[in-house]
Image (tube, rainbow, N blue to C red):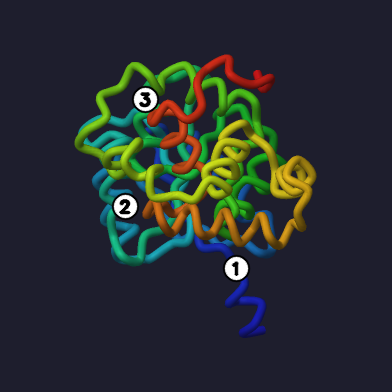
Amino acid sequence: MSSTSAARVRIVVADDHQVVRTGFAALLETQPDFTVLGTASDGAEAVRMSRELRPDVVLMDVRMPGTDGIEATRQVTGRADRPRVIILTTFDLDEYVYDALRAGASDFLLKDVTAERLFDAVRVVAAGEALLAPAVTRRLISEFARLWPKAGDQLGDPAAAIGELTPRETEVLRLLAEGLSNPEIAGRLVVTEETVKTHVSRVLHKLGLRDRTQAVVLAYESGLVTPGSHGGR
């Protein structure tokens, strides 16, 4: 029983609409490996609950009155015991979502997401394997990466950071930013998947990033990858 309990993903749901947050919470509670610790009606409450309850994942509405999802994400992910944040939004090409990704969010979901996609996203992000496979996420980043000021966020100076990478690590980052999975990168570089995992870990460590999502944002902002430079749409 204790091992099952330890394996549970602990979740907080934050949304200013009661129907939305209670609906997501009820849906997540149907899964035996999820525990919803509580729900928050705004960003400030989400930050407070994250500090007190220490969830693994916070589902965060991007647009809330008072402390919005962007500032709440910045505060939540800036802590040492930081949970991972999945942003909730009503439409995909949302500049607020891009700001939230830059602030430390690991992924985003549309509010009309299917139950299976929701469950999968929570499990993947909780495991630290945030992967921007959905084409819409890459499109969002490529759409807004060139438009935003580069200073004053968690990513620092993107170009200077990438200069610390070896040529092979830079190539791995480029392929990762194009949306390739570890097996796909391994095939492209003709190396083992384990070797790719090692390279990805080193890239994240050298750049001071927590997951692949942040690496993709940095790759675009540094100019390493540019919109239209690959086939992904």
Q: Which residue is mark 3?
A: 96
Residue 193, x across and y down, in percent: 74, 56
Residue 232, x across and y down, in percent: 67, 22
Badge 2 element: helix
For residue 19, say whether it is visible: no
Q: Which residue is mark 2?
A: 76
Outermost residue, bottom side: 2
Q: Earlier in the sequence, mark 2 or mark 3?
A: 2
Amino acid at the residue labelled 2 = Val
Residue 220, x across and y down, in percent: 45, 28
Q: Which residue is mark 1?
A: 8
Side of 15 relative to 127 (left or right): left
Tell me whether circle 2 and circle 3 mark residues in contact (CB < 8 Å): no
**Measured Cα–Cα span from mark 2 to mark 1:** 20 Å
Q: Is residue 170 above or below residue 206?
A: above
Badge 3 element: helix
Residue at the location (50% across, 37% down)?
216
Residue at the location (69% across, 19% down)?
231
Quarter where residue 184 is shown: top right
